[in-house]
Amino acid sequence: MGNDFGAQTKAYPSLPVETAQLLVDPLNRYFRYPWLQKIAEKLKSSWLHPDHLTWLHTCVGLLAVQLIYREHDTLGVCFFELRMILSALGSRLVRVQSRSTPRGRTLEMLGDALVFNALMCMGALRLIQDYRNYNPAVIVSGVAFFAWVTAQCGTVYQLMRRKLGGIIRKETDAVEIEWRQQYSLLRSGHGTILTRIGYGLDSWAVRFVSPEWYQKIVKRRDASDWEDRAIRDAALMNELACVTRKREFKSAVKATALMSDNNIFAIIGASLLGLSFFPKAFFPGVHPVLIAFGLGLIYGIVALGYGLLCLRSFLHGVYRE
């Protein structure tokens, strides 16, 4: 199905493949991916499967959270970076082995969510233990809000990286194709729990990014010509990105990279690492976790707001009635 989708849109202008690189968050684009790509190519024919790396980086991430909770911040940040490297290697291995599947992506999202929620719980516990004069409910509420902002950033980043990347590389809408495939599996009774989770997460993310987009795919999901309609939208998006809405598309691509939750984790890690070189007396009354989470929260709010503004501005030109 995906090959037919791409074949029918070749008449439209093609976007430079290099544009897809701008969808990747800066640390992966400039630091991790260049040298991990070479390692992934050497592992292309090995027994190593991307799912193995998903399990491994999840365990490493949980170990990093435990170290940070025990106030071994420097070592914890180092293990957290190792987790990010293993995750990036898994991403490169998926590409060279051509093993991109909805199941694998859902498993990756669950692993990320497990580590992320553990980090949030760790942060809340450390703050509650060290700020005994404060109401724990206030601390938990603040951490929960930070968790919500970061989760939105990560979910939207993954969704739009797949969507815009598919348009750039293949002139297809990879998100909608997989969403429809998951829906078909669930409707026929052949879907697994991972299929249900993936379908639910994608549905929620699509609605959050653009209600117009969500309404359109729901209206045509049972139509016999759903693929033809999706092809027309993908072709229109490609044409708009190349011709009439270049500025909006470029802004959407850059905003997508800024929304990556990897950026927020990098800010938290850099803050904890930097503060570890100062004695605690240097910041009297201010907890290093509070500083790190605060900086991450500020970045997340700005990135999410700006990202949604840019994405909705561009998508409105495709999905308006």
Image (tube, grey):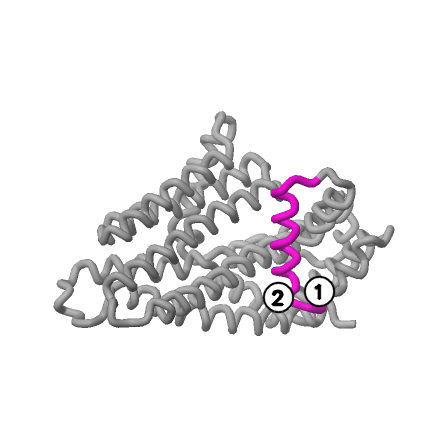
The residue to which callout 2 is attached is 209
> Which label sits on residue 29?
none
Q: Nearer the viewer, residue 134 or 166?
A: 134
Q: Is residue 281 left or right of residue 217?
A: left
Do callouts 1 and 2 mark residues in contact (Cβ within 8 Å)? yes
Instruction: State which quarter of the image contains the N terminus.
Output: top right
Q: What secondary structure is marked by label 1?
A: helix
Query: Which residue is found at the position 14% from the left and 69% from the top?
Result: 282
Q: Quadrant of residue 147?
A: bottom left
Query: Which residue is found at the position 12% from the left and 68% from the top?
Result: 281
Q: Is residue 136 left or right of residue 212?
A: left
Q: What secondary structure is marked by label 2?
A: helix
The range drawn in magenta is: 191-214
Give the vertical position of 279 relative to 87 (above or below): below
Residues under labels 1 and 2: Cα distance?
8 Å
Q: x%, y% of residue 203?
A: 66, 57
Q: Is residue 13 left or right of residue 67?
A: right
Give the vertical position of 135 relative to 59 (above or below): below
| Magenta highlight on residue 208 | yes
Q: Amino acid at mark 1?
A: Trp
The crowding category of the residue bearing disc 1, from other C-alpha atoms within 10 Å (few below 14, some 14 to 19, many at least 20), is some
Query: Which residue is found at the position 60% from the left and 72% from the top?
Result: 247
Q: x%, y% of residue 315?
A: 67, 68
Q: Amino acid at mark 2?
A: Val
The crowding category of the residue bearing disc 2, from other C-alpha atoms within 10 Å (few below 14, some 14 to 19, many at least 20), is many
How many numbered discs sit on the rendered protein?
Answer: 2
Query: Which residue is found at the position 56% from the left and 34% from the top?
Result: 97
Q: Is residue 168 visible?
A: no
Farthest residue, direction right: 224
The residue to which callout 1 is attached is 213
